Amino acid sequence: MIKEKIVEELNIEGLTADSVAEVPENFTGDYSIPCFPLAMKLGKNPAQIAKEIVEAFNNEASKSNGANKDKCVIEKLENVGPYINVTLNRNVVASEVDADKLNFDDYNGKVACVEFSSINLAKHPHIGHLCTTIIGACIAKIFEKVGYKVVRINYLGDYGTPFGKMITAFKKWGNKEEVEKIGVDALQDLYVKFCANENEELLSEAREWFKKIEEKDAEAVELYNWIIKISFNEIKHIYNLLGISFDDYNGESYYEGKRDEVIAELKAKNLVFESDGALLVDLNAYGLGNFMVLKSDGTSLYSTRDLAAAIDRKKKYNFDRSLYVTDTAQNLHFKSVFKTLELMGYDWAKDLTHINYGRLSTPQGKIASRRGKVAVLKDIFEVAETRAYEVVKERNLDKQVATDIGVSAISFGLLKTERIKDAVFDIESALNFDGETSVYLQYMNARLNSIFAKAKEQGLVAGEMVDGYKVNDDEFAIIKQIDLYKEMIFDAYKDCEPCYIARYALKLATLFSKFYNNHSILNGEKSEIQFRLGLCEKVKIVLVDCMNLLGVKVIEKM
Ligand code: ARG
Protein backbone atom coordinates (compact mmCIF):
# COMPACT_ATOMS: atom_id res chain seq x y z
CA MET A 1 0.00 0.00 0.00
CA ILE A 2 1.53 3.19 -1.25
CA LYS A 3 0.33 5.44 1.56
CA GLU A 4 2.24 3.31 4.06
CA LYS A 5 5.32 3.52 1.88
CA ILE A 6 5.07 7.31 1.76
CA VAL A 7 4.85 7.45 5.54
CA GLU A 8 7.76 5.05 5.87
CA GLU A 9 9.96 7.10 3.57
CA LEU A 10 9.05 10.38 5.24
CA ASN A 11 9.71 8.88 8.66
CA ILE A 12 8.01 11.59 10.70
CA GLU A 13 6.84 10.83 14.19
CA GLY A 14 3.06 10.85 14.53
CA LEU A 15 2.42 10.65 10.81
CA THR A 16 0.21 7.72 9.82
CA ALA A 17 -1.14 6.41 6.54
CA ASP A 18 -4.61 7.71 7.41
CA SER A 19 -3.34 11.24 7.17
CA VAL A 20 -2.38 10.81 3.54
CA ALA A 21 -5.25 12.06 1.41
CA GLU A 22 -6.30 12.56 -2.17
CA VAL A 23 -4.69 15.62 -3.64
CA PRO A 24 -7.14 18.55 -3.77
CA GLU A 25 -8.26 19.52 -7.23
CA ASN A 26 -6.12 22.02 -9.16
CA PHE A 27 -2.96 20.96 -7.35
CA THR A 28 -0.18 18.89 -8.77
CA GLY A 29 0.89 15.62 -7.25
CA ASP A 30 -0.65 12.30 -6.38
CA TYR A 31 -1.33 12.57 -2.69
CA SER A 32 -1.52 15.34 -0.18
CA ILE A 33 -0.72 15.44 3.51
CA PRO A 34 -2.62 18.07 5.47
CA CYS A 35 -0.44 19.06 8.42
CA PHE A 36 -3.20 20.18 10.80
CA PRO A 37 -3.21 17.07 13.02
CA LEU A 38 0.59 17.10 13.25
CA ALA A 39 0.49 20.80 14.12
CA MET A 40 -2.01 20.14 16.90
CA LYS A 41 0.21 17.48 18.38
CA LEU A 42 3.33 19.60 18.24
CA GLY A 43 1.61 22.89 19.07
CA LYS A 44 3.03 24.51 15.94
CA ASN A 45 1.72 26.32 12.91
CA PRO A 46 0.68 23.80 10.18
CA ALA A 47 2.12 25.81 7.29
CA GLN A 48 5.42 26.08 9.16
CA ILE A 49 5.54 22.32 9.76
CA ALA A 50 4.73 21.55 6.14
CA LYS A 51 7.53 23.82 5.02
CA GLU A 52 10.04 22.28 7.44
CA ILE A 53 9.21 18.74 6.41
CA VAL A 54 9.58 19.49 2.72
CA GLU A 55 12.87 21.30 3.27
CA ALA A 56 14.28 18.54 5.41
CA PHE A 57 13.28 15.93 2.86
CA ASN A 58 14.83 17.82 -0.02
CA ASN A 59 18.03 18.41 1.95
CA GLU A 60 18.32 14.75 2.74
CA ALA A 61 17.72 13.84 -0.89
CA SER A 62 20.40 16.20 -2.17
CA LYS A 63 22.87 14.98 0.46
CA SER A 64 22.46 11.39 -0.62
CA ASN A 65 22.79 12.60 -4.19
CA GLY A 66 19.62 10.82 -5.16
CA ALA A 67 21.30 7.48 -4.54
CA ASN A 68 18.15 5.62 -3.52
CA LYS A 69 15.80 7.70 -5.52
CA ASP A 70 15.08 5.03 -8.07
CA LYS A 71 13.70 2.78 -5.38
CA CYS A 72 11.61 5.32 -3.49
CA VAL A 73 7.92 5.82 -4.10
CA ILE A 74 8.26 9.55 -3.41
CA GLU A 75 9.62 11.39 -6.38
CA LYS A 76 8.98 14.94 -5.27
CA LEU A 77 7.55 16.88 -2.33
CA GLU A 78 6.00 20.28 -2.64
CA ASN A 79 4.80 22.60 0.05
CA VAL A 80 1.52 24.44 -0.54
CA GLY A 81 0.45 26.31 2.60
CA PRO A 82 -0.35 23.75 5.31
CA TYR A 83 -0.18 20.87 2.80
CA ILE A 84 2.57 18.66 1.57
CA ASN A 85 1.88 17.44 -1.93
CA VAL A 86 3.51 14.20 -2.91
CA THR A 87 4.37 13.27 -6.45
CA LEU A 88 5.04 9.58 -6.84
CA ASN A 89 7.67 7.74 -8.76
CA ARG A 90 5.33 5.96 -11.15
CA ASN A 91 7.58 3.11 -12.10
CA VAL A 92 8.37 2.19 -8.51
CA VAL A 93 4.69 2.33 -7.61
CA ALA A 94 3.71 0.33 -10.67
CA SER A 95 6.00 -2.50 -9.68
CA GLU A 96 4.92 -2.34 -6.01
CA VAL A 97 1.20 -2.65 -6.66
CA ASP A 98 0.30 -6.25 -7.01
CA ALA A 99 -3.23 -7.54 -7.37
CA ASP A 100 -2.19 -10.95 -6.05
CA LYS A 101 -1.89 -9.52 -2.58
CA LEU A 102 -5.62 -9.18 -2.32
CA ASN A 103 -6.30 -11.96 0.11
CA PHE A 104 -5.85 -10.69 3.58
CA ASP A 105 -6.44 -12.49 6.79
CA ASP A 106 -5.88 -9.87 9.45
CA TYR A 107 -8.77 -11.29 11.45
CA ASN A 108 -7.74 -14.85 10.89
CA GLY A 109 -9.52 -17.24 13.20
CA LYS A 110 -12.06 -14.77 14.52
CA VAL A 111 -15.72 -15.68 14.31
CA ALA A 112 -18.55 -13.42 13.23
CA CYS A 113 -22.23 -14.28 13.35
CA VAL A 114 -24.11 -12.39 10.68
CA GLU A 115 -27.86 -12.56 11.04
CA PHE A 116 -29.72 -11.41 7.97
CA SER A 117 -32.78 -12.01 5.81
CA SER A 118 -34.82 -13.33 8.77
CA ILE A 119 -38.05 -13.47 6.82
CA ASN A 120 -41.45 -13.97 8.37
CA LEU A 121 -42.94 -17.19 7.15
CA ALA A 122 -46.56 -17.50 6.06
CA LYS A 123 -46.29 -14.13 4.39
CA HIS A 124 -44.69 -12.82 1.26
CA PRO A 125 -41.22 -11.52 1.97
CA HIS A 126 -41.31 -7.85 1.05
CA ILE A 127 -38.88 -5.24 -0.16
CA GLY A 128 -37.50 -4.65 3.34
CA HIS A 129 -36.47 -8.28 3.47
CA LEU A 130 -34.71 -7.80 0.18
CA CYS A 131 -32.50 -5.17 1.79
CA THR A 132 -31.52 -7.28 4.76
CA THR A 133 -30.88 -10.26 2.49
CA ILE A 134 -28.64 -8.41 0.06
CA ILE A 135 -26.86 -6.14 2.54
CA GLY A 136 -26.36 -9.03 4.96
CA ALA A 137 -25.00 -11.33 2.27
CA CYS A 138 -22.50 -8.66 1.26
CA ILE A 139 -21.39 -7.91 4.81
CA ALA A 140 -20.90 -11.61 5.47
CA LYS A 141 -18.57 -11.74 2.46
CA ILE A 142 -16.69 -8.63 3.56
CA PHE A 143 -16.05 -10.22 6.95
CA GLU A 144 -14.81 -13.37 5.24
CA LYS A 145 -12.59 -11.29 3.02
CA VAL A 146 -10.77 -9.80 5.99
CA GLY A 147 -10.34 -13.22 7.53
CA TYR A 148 -13.33 -13.97 9.75
CA LYS A 149 -15.02 -17.31 9.86
CA VAL A 150 -18.63 -16.29 9.26
CA VAL A 151 -21.76 -18.01 10.53
CA ARG A 152 -24.72 -16.96 8.41
CA ILE A 153 -27.92 -16.96 10.40
CA ASN A 154 -31.48 -16.71 9.13
CA TYR A 155 -33.58 -15.95 12.20
CA LEU A 156 -36.85 -17.13 10.77
CA GLY A 157 -40.04 -15.40 11.82
CA ASP A 158 -41.78 -18.71 12.41
CA TYR A 159 -43.64 -17.93 15.60
CA GLY A 160 -46.72 -16.03 16.66
CA THR A 161 -50.45 -15.58 16.24
CA PRO A 162 -50.29 -15.20 12.43
CA PHE A 163 -49.87 -18.97 12.31
CA GLY A 164 -53.03 -19.45 14.38
CA LYS A 165 -54.89 -17.10 12.06
CA MET A 166 -53.59 -18.89 9.02
CA ILE A 167 -54.68 -22.30 10.26
CA THR A 168 -58.12 -20.97 11.17
CA ALA A 169 -58.53 -19.44 7.72
CA PHE A 170 -57.28 -22.59 6.05
CA LYS A 171 -59.66 -24.81 7.98
CA LYS A 172 -62.58 -22.54 7.06
CA TRP A 173 -61.92 -21.63 3.45
CA GLY A 174 -58.76 -23.37 2.30
CA ASN A 175 -58.04 -26.20 -0.05
CA LYS A 176 -54.88 -28.23 0.28
CA GLU A 177 -54.29 -28.95 -3.42
CA GLU A 178 -54.81 -25.33 -4.30
CA VAL A 179 -52.34 -24.07 -1.72
CA GLU A 180 -49.77 -26.63 -2.83
CA LYS A 181 -50.22 -25.57 -6.42
CA ILE A 182 -50.28 -21.80 -5.95
CA GLY A 183 -47.98 -21.43 -2.95
CA VAL A 184 -47.66 -18.39 -0.73
CA ASP A 185 -50.10 -16.38 -2.81
CA ALA A 186 -52.84 -18.73 -1.71
CA LEU A 187 -51.73 -18.47 1.92
CA GLN A 188 -51.63 -14.72 1.68
CA ASP A 189 -55.17 -14.69 0.26
CA LEU A 190 -56.36 -16.78 3.17
CA TYR A 191 -54.71 -14.40 5.59
CA VAL A 192 -56.33 -11.41 3.92
CA LYS A 193 -59.70 -13.17 4.08
CA PHE A 194 -59.20 -13.76 7.79
CA CYS A 195 -58.48 -10.08 8.37
CA ALA A 196 -61.46 -9.00 6.30
CA ASN A 197 -63.79 -11.20 8.32
CA GLU A 198 -62.07 -10.77 11.64
CA ASN A 199 -64.36 -10.94 14.67
CA GLU A 200 -64.13 -12.17 18.25
CA GLU A 201 -65.12 -15.68 17.33
CA LEU A 202 -62.48 -16.01 14.60
CA LEU A 203 -59.85 -14.46 16.81
CA SER A 204 -60.52 -16.84 19.65
CA GLU A 205 -60.31 -19.75 17.23
CA ALA A 206 -56.97 -18.43 16.02
CA ARG A 207 -55.68 -18.15 19.58
CA GLU A 208 -56.87 -21.70 20.17
CA TRP A 209 -54.87 -22.99 17.18
CA PHE A 210 -51.83 -21.06 18.19
CA LYS A 211 -52.07 -22.58 21.65
CA LYS A 212 -52.35 -26.00 20.09
CA ILE A 213 -49.16 -25.40 18.12
CA GLU A 214 -47.40 -24.54 21.36
CA GLU A 215 -48.82 -27.58 23.08
CA LYS A 216 -47.61 -29.74 20.19
CA ASP A 217 -51.02 -30.97 19.20
CA ALA A 218 -50.41 -33.36 16.28
CA GLU A 219 -52.76 -31.77 13.75
CA ALA A 220 -51.70 -28.21 14.61
CA VAL A 221 -48.02 -29.04 14.31
CA GLU A 222 -48.56 -30.81 11.02
CA LEU A 223 -50.39 -27.81 9.56
CA TYR A 224 -47.82 -25.42 10.97
CA ASN A 225 -44.93 -27.33 9.39
CA TRP A 226 -46.79 -27.51 6.13
CA ILE A 227 -47.35 -23.73 6.07
CA ILE A 228 -43.68 -23.18 6.78
CA LYS A 229 -42.68 -25.49 3.97
CA ILE A 230 -44.94 -23.77 1.44
CA SER A 231 -43.70 -20.31 2.48
CA PHE A 232 -40.10 -21.29 2.41
CA ASN A 233 -40.30 -22.56 -1.16
CA GLU A 234 -40.77 -19.07 -2.51
CA ILE A 235 -37.77 -17.61 -0.75
CA LYS A 236 -35.64 -20.66 -1.54
CA HIS A 237 -35.88 -19.79 -5.20
CA ILE A 238 -34.67 -16.25 -4.49
CA TYR A 239 -31.79 -17.44 -2.29
CA ASN A 240 -30.75 -19.71 -5.15
CA LEU A 241 -30.85 -16.88 -7.64
CA LEU A 242 -28.73 -14.73 -5.34
CA GLY A 243 -26.41 -17.62 -4.50
CA ILE A 244 -27.03 -17.29 -0.77
CA SER A 245 -27.08 -20.04 1.82
CA PHE A 246 -27.23 -20.08 5.60
CA ASP A 247 -25.54 -22.11 8.32
CA ASP A 248 -28.21 -21.66 10.96
CA TYR A 249 -31.97 -21.36 10.53
CA ASN A 250 -32.97 -21.28 14.18
CA GLY A 251 -35.83 -18.86 14.30
CA GLU A 252 -38.17 -17.33 16.80
CA SER A 253 -40.03 -20.54 17.59
CA TYR A 254 -36.76 -22.20 18.56
CA TYR A 255 -35.91 -19.39 20.96
CA GLU A 256 -39.41 -19.28 22.36
CA GLY A 257 -38.44 -22.65 23.82
CA LYS A 258 -35.60 -20.98 25.70
CA ARG A 259 -37.47 -18.00 27.06
CA ASP A 260 -38.10 -19.44 30.56
CA GLU A 261 -34.37 -19.68 31.17
CA VAL A 262 -33.92 -16.02 30.23
CA ILE A 263 -36.78 -14.84 32.41
CA ALA A 264 -35.40 -16.86 35.34
CA GLU A 265 -31.97 -15.37 34.80
CA LEU A 266 -33.32 -11.81 34.63
CA LYS A 267 -35.19 -12.42 37.86
CA ALA A 268 -32.18 -13.95 39.57
CA LYS A 269 -30.08 -10.97 38.55
CA ASN A 270 -32.72 -8.62 39.91
CA LEU A 271 -33.17 -6.87 36.61
CA VAL A 272 -36.95 -7.03 36.20
CA PHE A 273 -39.85 -5.34 37.91
CA GLU A 274 -43.53 -6.16 37.68
CA SER A 275 -46.21 -3.84 36.41
CA ASP A 276 -49.82 -4.94 35.90
CA GLY A 277 -48.66 -8.51 35.72
CA ALA A 278 -46.08 -7.81 33.01
CA LEU A 279 -42.32 -8.04 33.52
CA LEU A 280 -40.10 -5.15 32.47
CA VAL A 281 -36.45 -4.15 32.54
CA ASP A 282 -35.92 -0.55 33.60
CA LEU A 283 -33.70 1.05 30.98
CA ASN A 284 -34.78 4.62 31.67
CA ALA A 285 -31.36 5.57 32.93
CA TYR A 286 -30.08 4.92 29.42
CA GLY A 287 -32.86 6.78 27.66
CA LEU A 288 -34.41 3.54 26.47
CA GLY A 289 -37.57 3.46 28.60
CA ASN A 290 -38.95 0.24 30.03
CA PHE A 291 -38.20 -2.90 28.10
CA MET A 292 -40.98 -5.48 28.37
CA VAL A 293 -39.87 -9.11 28.47
CA LEU A 294 -43.07 -10.89 29.51
CA LYS A 295 -46.65 -9.84 28.84
CA SER A 296 -49.30 -9.86 31.55
CA ASP A 297 -50.93 -12.90 29.96
CA GLY A 298 -47.67 -14.78 30.37
CA THR A 299 -46.77 -14.83 26.69
CA SER A 300 -43.27 -13.90 25.70
CA LEU A 301 -42.14 -11.25 23.31
CA TYR A 302 -39.86 -10.51 20.40
CA SER A 303 -37.51 -8.96 22.97
CA THR A 304 -37.25 -12.10 25.13
CA ARG A 305 -36.54 -14.30 22.15
CA ASP A 306 -33.75 -11.99 21.02
CA LEU A 307 -32.14 -12.13 24.45
CA ALA A 308 -32.29 -15.92 24.32
CA ALA A 309 -30.91 -16.00 20.78
CA ALA A 310 -27.93 -13.76 21.58
CA ILE A 311 -26.95 -15.87 24.61
CA ASP A 312 -27.37 -19.10 22.67
CA ARG A 313 -25.25 -17.85 19.75
CA LYS A 314 -22.46 -16.88 22.08
CA LYS A 315 -22.51 -20.37 23.63
CA LYS A 316 -22.69 -22.12 20.29
CA TYR A 317 -20.26 -20.10 18.21
CA ASN A 318 -18.23 -18.14 20.72
CA PHE A 319 -18.31 -15.21 18.31
CA ASP A 320 -15.99 -12.22 18.35
CA ARG A 321 -18.64 -10.16 16.60
CA SER A 322 -22.36 -10.72 16.18
CA LEU A 323 -24.31 -8.62 13.71
CA TYR A 324 -28.00 -8.06 13.07
CA VAL A 325 -29.05 -6.66 9.74
CA THR A 326 -32.49 -5.02 9.95
CA ASP A 327 -34.06 -1.68 9.12
CA THR A 328 -33.73 1.44 11.24
CA ALA A 329 -37.25 0.92 12.64
CA GLN A 330 -35.65 -1.61 15.00
CA ASN A 331 -32.98 0.72 16.39
CA LEU A 332 -34.60 1.05 19.80
CA HIS A 333 -35.28 -2.66 20.02
CA PHE A 334 -31.65 -3.61 19.47
CA LYS A 335 -30.30 -0.90 21.73
CA SER A 336 -32.54 -2.30 24.47
CA VAL A 337 -31.53 -5.90 23.80
CA PHE A 338 -27.82 -5.03 23.87
CA LYS A 339 -28.14 -2.91 27.00
CA THR A 340 -30.10 -5.61 28.83
CA LEU A 341 -27.44 -8.19 27.99
CA GLU A 342 -24.78 -5.82 29.27
CA LEU A 343 -26.70 -5.39 32.54
CA MET A 344 -26.97 -9.17 32.77
CA GLY A 345 -23.20 -9.09 33.04
CA TYR A 346 -22.29 -10.29 29.57
CA ASP A 347 -19.21 -8.34 28.61
CA TRP A 348 -19.56 -9.62 25.05
CA ALA A 349 -22.61 -7.37 24.66
CA LYS A 350 -20.10 -4.84 23.30
CA ASP A 351 -19.46 -7.19 20.37
CA LEU A 352 -23.05 -7.00 19.17
CA THR A 353 -23.84 -4.60 16.35
CA HIS A 354 -27.08 -3.58 14.74
CA ILE A 355 -26.48 -2.97 11.05
CA ASN A 356 -29.41 -0.79 10.16
CA TYR A 357 -30.56 0.47 6.83
CA GLY A 358 -33.06 2.98 5.48
CA ARG A 359 -36.30 2.48 3.72
CA LEU A 360 -36.35 1.27 0.17
CA SER A 361 -39.23 1.87 -2.16
CA THR A 362 -39.99 1.19 -5.78
CA PRO A 363 -41.22 3.94 -8.08
CA GLN A 364 -44.95 4.48 -7.73
CA GLY A 365 -47.15 2.25 -9.78
CA LYS A 366 -44.42 -0.07 -10.95
CA ILE A 367 -43.85 -3.15 -8.90
CA ALA A 368 -45.82 -2.11 -5.86
CA SER A 369 -49.12 -1.81 -7.65
CA ARG A 370 -49.19 -5.42 -8.67
CA ARG A 371 -50.39 -6.78 -5.39
CA GLY A 372 -51.78 -3.95 -3.39
CA LYS A 373 -49.62 -1.79 -1.19
CA VAL A 374 -46.41 -3.69 -0.61
CA ALA A 375 -43.91 -4.62 -3.23
CA VAL A 376 -43.39 -8.34 -3.02
CA LEU A 377 -39.95 -9.76 -3.49
CA LYS A 378 -40.92 -12.33 -6.06
CA ASP A 379 -42.36 -9.64 -8.32
CA ILE A 380 -39.24 -7.54 -8.12
CA PHE A 381 -37.19 -10.46 -9.42
CA GLU A 382 -39.71 -11.26 -12.13
CA VAL A 383 -39.81 -7.70 -13.38
CA ALA A 384 -36.02 -7.45 -13.32
CA GLU A 385 -35.63 -10.65 -15.27
CA THR A 386 -38.21 -9.71 -17.87
CA ARG A 387 -36.70 -6.28 -18.42
CA ALA A 388 -33.20 -7.72 -18.53
CA TYR A 389 -34.35 -10.20 -21.13
CA GLU A 390 -35.62 -7.38 -23.34
CA VAL A 391 -32.26 -5.69 -22.95
CA VAL A 392 -30.17 -8.77 -23.79
CA LYS A 393 -32.39 -9.80 -26.71
CA GLU A 394 -31.24 -6.75 -28.60
CA ARG A 395 -27.70 -7.97 -28.08
CA ASN A 396 -28.29 -11.59 -28.97
CA LEU A 397 -27.49 -12.93 -25.54
CA ASP A 398 -29.15 -15.93 -23.99
CA LYS A 399 -31.70 -16.31 -21.23
CA GLN A 400 -29.26 -17.22 -18.47
CA VAL A 401 -27.43 -13.96 -19.12
CA ALA A 402 -30.73 -12.12 -18.66
CA THR A 403 -31.23 -13.77 -15.30
CA ASP A 404 -27.67 -12.95 -14.25
CA ILE A 405 -28.03 -9.35 -15.36
CA GLY A 406 -31.41 -8.92 -13.67
CA VAL A 407 -30.38 -10.44 -10.34
CA SER A 408 -27.13 -8.48 -10.29
CA ALA A 409 -28.96 -5.25 -11.04
CA ILE A 410 -31.11 -5.79 -7.97
CA SER A 411 -28.14 -6.48 -5.69
CA PHE A 412 -26.03 -3.66 -7.00
CA GLY A 413 -28.97 -1.24 -7.12
CA LEU A 414 -29.43 -1.75 -3.39
CA LEU A 415 -25.79 -1.73 -2.40
CA LYS A 416 -24.59 1.33 -4.22
CA THR A 417 -26.10 3.87 -1.84
CA GLU A 418 -25.20 4.30 1.80
CA ARG A 419 -27.27 1.78 3.64
CA ILE A 420 -28.74 4.25 6.09
CA LYS A 421 -30.25 6.42 3.37
CA ASP A 422 -33.78 5.96 2.11
CA ALA A 423 -33.65 4.94 -1.50
CA VAL A 424 -35.84 4.25 -4.47
CA PHE A 425 -35.08 1.18 -6.48
CA ASP A 426 -35.79 1.69 -10.13
CA ILE A 427 -35.14 -1.30 -12.33
CA GLU A 428 -34.94 0.80 -15.51
CA SER A 429 -31.99 2.81 -14.34
CA ALA A 430 -30.42 -0.26 -12.73
CA LEU A 431 -30.24 -1.84 -16.18
CA ASN A 432 -28.60 1.07 -17.97
CA PHE A 433 -25.41 -0.07 -19.72
CA ASP A 434 -23.77 3.32 -19.41
CA GLY A 435 -24.89 4.26 -15.95
CA GLU A 436 -23.57 3.55 -12.49
CA THR A 437 -24.79 0.01 -12.72
CA SER A 438 -23.82 -3.61 -12.39
CA VAL A 439 -24.29 -4.03 -16.14
CA TYR A 440 -21.55 -1.51 -16.63
CA LEU A 441 -19.20 -3.57 -14.46
CA GLN A 442 -20.22 -6.77 -16.21
CA TYR A 443 -19.64 -5.15 -19.55
CA MET A 444 -16.15 -3.94 -18.60
CA ASN A 445 -15.24 -7.40 -17.45
CA ALA A 446 -16.46 -8.88 -20.74
CA ARG A 447 -14.38 -6.30 -22.56
CA LEU A 448 -11.31 -7.35 -20.62
CA ASN A 449 -12.02 -10.95 -21.58
CA SER A 450 -12.17 -10.07 -25.22
CA ILE A 451 -8.84 -8.25 -24.96
CA PHE A 452 -7.29 -11.37 -23.43
CA ALA A 453 -8.82 -13.56 -26.13
CA LYS A 454 -7.43 -11.35 -28.88
CA ALA A 455 -4.03 -11.20 -27.21
CA LYS A 456 -3.97 -14.96 -27.05
CA GLU A 457 -4.82 -15.25 -30.73
CA GLN A 458 -1.95 -12.95 -31.56
CA GLY A 459 0.44 -14.67 -29.19
CA LEU A 460 0.82 -11.57 -26.99
CA VAL A 461 1.52 -11.97 -23.30
CA ALA A 462 1.72 -9.81 -20.23
CA GLY A 463 5.12 -9.19 -18.76
CA GLU A 464 7.23 -7.18 -16.35
CA MET A 465 7.63 -3.47 -16.92
CA VAL A 466 10.82 -2.78 -18.84
CA ASP A 467 13.30 -0.27 -17.43
CA GLY A 468 12.64 3.25 -18.52
CA TYR A 469 9.01 2.60 -19.41
CA LYS A 470 6.99 5.79 -19.11
CA VAL A 471 3.75 5.10 -17.23
CA ASN A 472 1.12 7.45 -18.64
CA ASP A 473 -1.59 9.31 -16.69
CA ASP A 474 -4.40 6.90 -17.51
CA GLU A 475 -2.30 3.89 -16.55
CA PHE A 476 -1.15 5.49 -13.37
CA ALA A 477 -4.68 6.43 -12.33
CA ILE A 478 -5.58 2.74 -12.55
CA ILE A 479 -2.53 1.68 -10.58
CA LYS A 480 -3.37 4.10 -7.80
CA GLN A 481 -6.93 2.87 -7.70
CA ILE A 482 -5.81 -0.76 -7.44
CA ASP A 483 -3.44 0.23 -4.66
CA LEU A 484 -6.38 1.62 -2.68
CA TYR A 485 -8.27 -1.66 -2.77
CA LYS A 486 -7.16 -3.06 0.55
CA GLU A 487 -7.74 0.18 2.41
CA MET A 488 -11.21 0.45 0.89
CA ILE A 489 -12.08 -3.10 1.96
CA PHE A 490 -11.03 -2.38 5.54
CA ASP A 491 -13.12 0.78 5.56
CA ALA A 492 -16.08 -1.20 4.23
CA TYR A 493 -15.45 -3.73 6.98
CA LYS A 494 -15.11 -1.14 9.74
CA ASP A 495 -18.22 0.79 8.72
CA CYS A 496 -20.11 -2.28 7.45
CA GLU A 497 -20.74 -0.28 4.34
CA PRO A 498 -21.07 -2.17 1.03
CA CYS A 499 -21.47 1.06 -0.95
CA TYR A 500 -17.72 1.73 -0.63
CA ILE A 501 -17.08 -1.35 -2.72
CA ALA A 502 -19.73 -0.38 -5.26
CA ARG A 503 -18.29 3.12 -5.67
CA TYR A 504 -14.77 1.78 -5.85
CA ALA A 505 -15.67 -0.74 -8.55
CA LEU A 506 -17.46 1.91 -10.61
CA LYS A 507 -14.44 4.16 -10.42
CA LEU A 508 -12.09 1.37 -11.41
CA ALA A 509 -14.32 0.47 -14.35
CA THR A 510 -14.51 4.11 -15.43
CA LEU A 511 -10.73 4.52 -15.23
CA PHE A 512 -10.27 1.37 -17.22
CA SER A 513 -12.75 2.52 -19.83
CA LYS A 514 -10.89 5.81 -20.20
CA PHE A 515 -7.58 4.02 -20.56
CA TYR A 516 -9.07 1.64 -23.11
CA ASN A 517 -10.53 4.47 -25.16
CA ASN A 518 -7.37 6.57 -25.13
CA HIS A 519 -4.75 3.91 -25.76
CA SER A 520 -4.40 0.91 -27.91
CA ILE A 521 -3.62 -2.09 -25.76
CA LEU A 522 -2.64 -4.64 -28.38
CA ASN A 523 -0.98 -2.42 -30.99
CA GLY A 524 2.21 -0.77 -29.98
CA GLU A 525 5.72 -1.32 -28.78
CA LYS A 526 6.35 -4.71 -27.21
CA SER A 527 7.10 -3.04 -23.88
CA GLU A 528 3.80 -1.19 -24.02
CA ILE A 529 1.78 -4.26 -24.89
CA GLN A 530 3.25 -6.39 -22.14
CA PHE A 531 2.84 -3.70 -19.49
CA ARG A 532 -0.70 -2.87 -20.53
CA LEU A 533 -1.77 -6.49 -20.67
CA GLY A 534 -0.36 -6.93 -17.18
CA LEU A 535 -2.34 -3.92 -16.04
CA CYS A 536 -5.51 -5.36 -17.59
CA GLU A 537 -4.94 -8.57 -15.66
CA LYS A 538 -4.72 -6.65 -12.41
CA VAL A 539 -7.88 -4.70 -13.21
CA LYS A 540 -9.68 -7.94 -13.92
CA ILE A 541 -8.64 -9.54 -10.62
CA VAL A 542 -9.80 -6.56 -8.59
CA LEU A 543 -12.96 -5.95 -10.58
CA VAL A 544 -14.07 -9.57 -10.32
CA ASP A 545 -13.29 -9.56 -6.61
CA CYS A 546 -15.55 -6.54 -6.13
CA MET A 547 -18.27 -8.10 -8.24
CA ASN A 548 -18.19 -11.26 -6.14
CA LEU A 549 -18.45 -9.29 -2.94
CA LEU A 550 -21.38 -7.30 -4.30
CA GLY A 551 -23.30 -10.29 -5.62
CA VAL A 552 -22.81 -9.15 -9.20
CA LYS A 553 -22.52 -12.18 -11.46
CA VAL A 554 -19.54 -12.40 -13.71
CA ILE A 555 -20.62 -12.87 -17.32
CA GLU A 556 -17.75 -14.02 -19.49
CA LYS A 557 -19.02 -12.71 -22.81
CA MET A 558 -21.44 -9.89 -23.56
N1 ARG B 1 -38.36 -11.24 11.23
C1 ARG B 1 -38.24 -9.87 11.58
C2 ARG B 1 -38.95 -8.99 10.58
O1 ARG B 1 -39.16 -9.41 9.47
C3 ARG B 1 -36.81 -9.41 11.68
C4 ARG B 1 -35.95 -10.15 12.65
C5 ARG B 1 -34.72 -9.38 12.99
N2 ARG B 1 -33.81 -10.07 13.84
C6 ARG B 1 -33.87 -10.18 15.16
N3 ARG B 1 -32.94 -10.85 15.77
N4 ARG B 1 -34.81 -9.58 15.84
O2 ARG B 1 -39.29 -7.87 10.88
Image (tube, grey):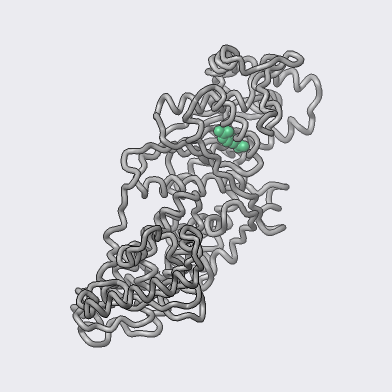
Q: Position of residue 212 (x, y in %)?
A: 62, 15
The residue lying toward the viewer, choosing from 364 and 42, is 42
The residue lying toward the viewer, choosing from 405 and 474, is 474
Residue occupying image coordinates x 26% and y 67%: 96
- Farthest front residue in view: 43
Q: Position of residue 12 (x, y in %)?
A: 36, 63
Q: Where does the C terminus fall, quadrant-wise? A: bottom left
Res 121 → quadrant: top right
Ligand 1 sits in quadrant: top right
Res 533 → quadrant: bottom left
Residue occupying image coordinates x 55% and y 26%: 341
Res 259 → quadrant: top right
The residue lying toward the viewer, choosing from 90 and 392, is 90
Is residue 508 in view? yes
Give above or below for 136 relative to 103: above
Residue 315 falls left or right of residue 134:
left
Is residue 396 in view? no
- Farthest right residue in view: 199
Give above or below for 115 relative to 342: below
